[in-house]
Image: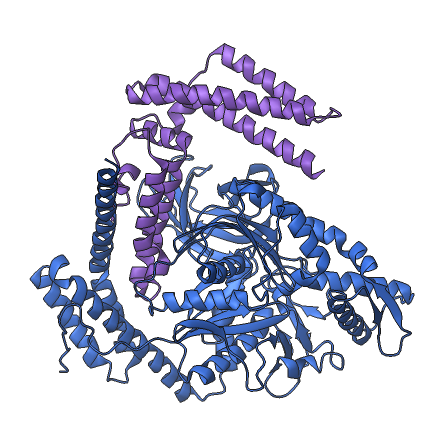
């Protein structure tokens, strides 16, 4: 039997090696990856030195998908096989994305699918292909496997969109440390860089999404006071308006997919050029040249810009602050280069926005900074991000009304319970419809899932008390559990997500994406299981070194050590099942130790505070 | 951690209606710095699950402790005056008539050419009434007179609802 090394308290068993974590900005138009290396966060380039990876995936009938610039050059030739801006389709149904330039499959409801030469492709798969390329870039640059990633999402992403993003990471074989809201990531990069405390407004207008967040920065604590936005409003919409203008100028009725794509490409080029000059030539192959002035462009996009200002106004009101309370305004996202956008933002907030940060890279940099902390490289960091849920969560009640259970802009994690009862004698099942949104009527909200509560003990009508708990975790993702209170019976739940993929669908995609034989799959599983075991042992060892002597009785400590030794011995075996059982059993056995450590840590934190306050009083005297 | 303990105990504060906002905020941050899931992201799944539960409980406690009306409702519930008891109580007729008055004024606002001064006036009136009730509530709770306190809470809830409607109206008018 292998003996476990027990080190002196305060000394690690092995010299501490930094873990490898990435921050990934999975954008609508471009994606980036960043990492903290020798103390500072930087974006990682590809072999050719490019930081930005175009979020474009080309699917052909044969071979692996192509991602990035290689795919972008194929867009005009294969408009239906080259997927751009897939972020706009994440967690969306066909009903939501009417009028897309792609051929769409999938039912009216449920996750939309693109019909390509490679068959049906979900936005989740296309996003996973992009993540794969970024993770590979990270592995190559860092020369190591990746221990975990922080992926940024628009703050205004709802549950379905967040879940789809997490699914994509799972498909790419990445461990998600956290889904981080993009404006919060920008605030982290800005705040840690400037060291300024105060109230910050982050205005983030990207390729496909708009967010505005109001945060209070105070000595490493980033407290989001409110967030607002529109997850379907961005530079793509500017392009579409310009393309529609050109279509009208050309008197085109219904352009072919290739021509529609060419119009959009020309629109984007014209828009970008107009940030620097007053007028540009609008050129599309095979069509006469047009002239587009900045004035015409501004007339076209003005209504969209106004929408962003209204959302900013609402976020301020929700945050309970006035524009005069704002200490700085940070611009994020490529679309904030449009002069009209900058002018509207500075007029509304009554101050010049900060322009010294690169609006393209700031989000990835912030994500990398948080990833470095979360993976455990900075145990003494003071950084703490307190984020909020962007949209209210609730239930369908009688008459098609939405009853809110968790209000928007509530700090996460949050748990709220609601009680229900039966309306028929002997009723044993009940269905619950979970919604997200701000409207009063169900139709105006997004359907997240339908839950079937089963195994309710038969009782007289109104006697059962079913307590349904909604829990939103730090990723902004919802979990639901239910319990019958009078009997204590846990009621079974069948979840039918309205948009996300089913668990077995993901497993199937994983299997399909592995070009390995069955034994390779086994070895991958074994490697993952061994990693789990090793991480648990390391965690527990360092916890024991710190608190084992004070928080555990001798017998408890010895019991844990014996289980750890058994698991350490089992690590060498090739039996996945045995290893998994030993890991799970040790994790369970250590749970009360983990709870005691947390209790001790908060006692200490509050005691420290009381002493500090007494000191302050003393000084005041 | 005992998830049934009182919010005051969690924050290690005496059970009193008056709290020092700065102190509560400071304690909140100290607790979250230990318990937030970000602090346990490198830990095992059990530890992460505990962190989500504990952190959510601290958030709930903070929401309650920092908001005077919610804090009062919480203190009353601890004394047996829960939501059902509160909602079954009667408030005096004078107060109700005053409420109906304000509500009528609010409903007529949308027809006015210049609604803003009227809205401002209504919001000021609600604010003044609330402040008065809040001080009644504070002395009621200090004297452990839960009857007076419960009545004050009930009235404050009416006013809160009205204020929310007035603010909603204001934002509609502002946004056109």
In the displayed structure, does residue A372 sit left or right of residue A433? left
Which of the two residues, A169 or A55, is positioned nearer the viewer here? A55
- Give residue A308's position: percent from left, percent from top: 66, 51
Number of marks drawn: 0
- Chain identifier matching the blue colour in the rendered picture: A
Please determine whether, in this image, residue A498 is positioned above or below residue A243: above
Which of the two residues, B5 or A359, is positioned nearer the viewer here? A359
Please determine whether, in this image, residue A15 is positioned above or below residue A595: below
Q: Residue at x 33, y 76 (%)?
A: A18
- Chain identifier matching the purple colour in the rendered picture: B
Assign the N terminus of chain A to one quadrant of the image: bottom left
Q: Residue at x 70, y 61 (%)?
A: A338
In the displayed structure, does residue B149 sit left or right of residue A239? left
Q: Residue at x 12, y 58 (%)?
A: A550
Res A458 visible: no
Res A400 visible: yes
The image quadrant that residue A360 belongs to is bottom right
Please determine whether, in this image, residue B162 is positioned above or below residue A104: above
- Give residue A306's position: percent from left, percent from top: 71, 49
In the displayed structure, does residue B88 sit left or right of residue A304? left
- Give residue A545's position: percent from left, percent from top: 17, 67
Residue, far top: B94
Which of the two residues, A573 or A70, is positioned nearer the viewer here? A70
Assign the C terminus of chain A to one quadrant of the image: top left
- Give residue B137's position: percent from left, percent from top: 38, 21
The image quadrant that residue A526 belongs to is bottom left
Residue, far left: A554
């Amino acid at each position: 039997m292998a003996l476990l090394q027990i080190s002196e308290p305060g000394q690690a068993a092995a010299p501490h090696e930094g873990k490898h974590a990435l921050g990934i900005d999975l954008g609508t138009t471009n994606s980036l990856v960043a990492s903290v290396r020798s103390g500072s966060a930087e974006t990682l380039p590809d072999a050719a030195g490019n930081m930005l990876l175009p979020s474009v995936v080309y699917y052909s009938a044969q071979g692996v998908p192509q991602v990035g610039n290689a795919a972008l050059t194929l867009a005009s030739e294969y408009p239906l096989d080259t997927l751009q801006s897939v972020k706009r389709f994440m967690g969306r149904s066909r009903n939501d994305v009417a009028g897309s330039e792609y051929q769409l499959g999938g039912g009216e409801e449920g996750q939309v699918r693109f019909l390509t030469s490679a068959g049906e492709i979900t936005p989740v798969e296309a996003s996973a292909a992009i993540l794969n390329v970024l993770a590979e870039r990270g592995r190559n640059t860092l020369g190591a496997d990746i221990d975990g990633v922080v992926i940024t999402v628009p703050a205004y992403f709802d549950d379905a969109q967040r879940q789809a993003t997490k699914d994509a990471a799972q498909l790419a074989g990445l461990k998600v440390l956290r889904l981080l809201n993009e404006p919060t990531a920008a605030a982290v990069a800005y705040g840690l860089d400037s060291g300024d405390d105060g109230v910050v407004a982050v205005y983030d207008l990207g390729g496909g999404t708009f967010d505005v967040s109001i945060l209070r920065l105070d000595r490493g604590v980033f407290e989001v006071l409110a967030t607002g936005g529109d997850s379907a409003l961005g530079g793509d919409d500017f392009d579409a308006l310009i393309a529609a203008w050109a279509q009208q100028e050309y008197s085109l009725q219904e352009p072919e997919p290739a021509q529609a794509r060419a119009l959009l490409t020309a629109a984007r080029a014209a828009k970008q050029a107009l940030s620097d000059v007053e007028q540009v030539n609008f050129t599309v192959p095979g069509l006469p040249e047009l002239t587009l002035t900045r004035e015409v462009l501004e007339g076209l996009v003005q209504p969209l810009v106004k929408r962003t200002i209204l959302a900013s106004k609402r976020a301020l009101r929700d945050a309970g602050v006035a524009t005069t309370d704002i200490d700085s305004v940070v611009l994020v996202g490529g679309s904030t280069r449009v002069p009209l956008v900058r002018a509207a933002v500075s007029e509304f907030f009554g101050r010049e926005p900060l322009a010294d940060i690169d609006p393209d890279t700031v989000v990835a940099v912030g994500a990398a900074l948080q990833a470095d902390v979360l993976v455990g490289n900075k145990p003494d960091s003071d950084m703490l991000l307190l984020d909020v849920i962007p949209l209210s969560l609730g239930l369908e009640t009688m008459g098609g009304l939405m009853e809110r259970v968790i209000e928007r802009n509530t700090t996460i994690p949050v748990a709220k319970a609601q009680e229900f009862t039966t309306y028929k004698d002997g009723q044993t099942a009940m269905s619950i419809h979970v919604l997200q949104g701000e409207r009063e009527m169900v139709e105006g909200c997004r359907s997240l899932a339908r839950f079937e509560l089963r195994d309710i003990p038969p009782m007289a009508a109104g006697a059962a008390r079913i307590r349904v708990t909604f829990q939103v975790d730090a990723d902004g993702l919802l979990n639901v559990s239910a319990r019958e209170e009078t009997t204590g019976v846990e009621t079974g739940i069948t979840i039918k997500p309205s948009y996300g993929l089913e668990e077995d669908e993901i497993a199937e995609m994983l299997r399909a994406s592995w070009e390995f034989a069955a034994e390779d799959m086994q070895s991958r599983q074994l490697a993952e299981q061994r990693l789990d075991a090793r991480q648990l042992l390391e965690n527990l060892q360092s916890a024991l070194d710190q608190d084992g002597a004070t928080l555990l009785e001798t017998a408890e400590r010895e019991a844990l050590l014996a289980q750890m030794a058994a698991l350490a011995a089992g690590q060498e075996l090739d039996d996945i099942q045995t290893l998994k059982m030993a890991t799970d059993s040790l994790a369970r056995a250590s749970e009360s130790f983990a709870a005691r450590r947390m209790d001790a840590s908060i006692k200490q934190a509050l005691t420290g505070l009381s002493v500090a306050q007494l000191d302050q009083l003393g000084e005041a005297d | 951690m005992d998830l049934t303990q009182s919010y005051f105990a969690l924050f290690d504060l005496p059970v009193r209606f008056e709290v020092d906002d700065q102190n509560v905020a400071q304690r909140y941050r100290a607790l979250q710095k230990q318990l937030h899931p970000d602090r346990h992201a490198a830990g095992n799944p059990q530890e992460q699950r505990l962190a989500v539960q504990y952190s959510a409980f601290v958030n709930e406690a903070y929401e309650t402790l920092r908001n005077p009306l919610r804090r009062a409702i919480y203190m009353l519930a601890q004394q047996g005056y829960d939501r059902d008891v509160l909602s079954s109580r009667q408030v005096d007729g004078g107060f109700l008539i005053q409420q109906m008055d304000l509500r009528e004024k609010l409903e007529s606002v949308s027809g006015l050419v210049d609604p803003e001064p009227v809205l401002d006036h209504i919001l000021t009136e609600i604010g003044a009434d609330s402040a008065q009730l809040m001080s009644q509530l504070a002395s009621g709770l200090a004297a452990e007179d839960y009857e007076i306190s419960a009545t004050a809470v009930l009235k404050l809830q009416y006013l809160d609802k009205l204020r929310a409607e007035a603010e909603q109206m204001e934002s509609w008018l502002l946004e056109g």
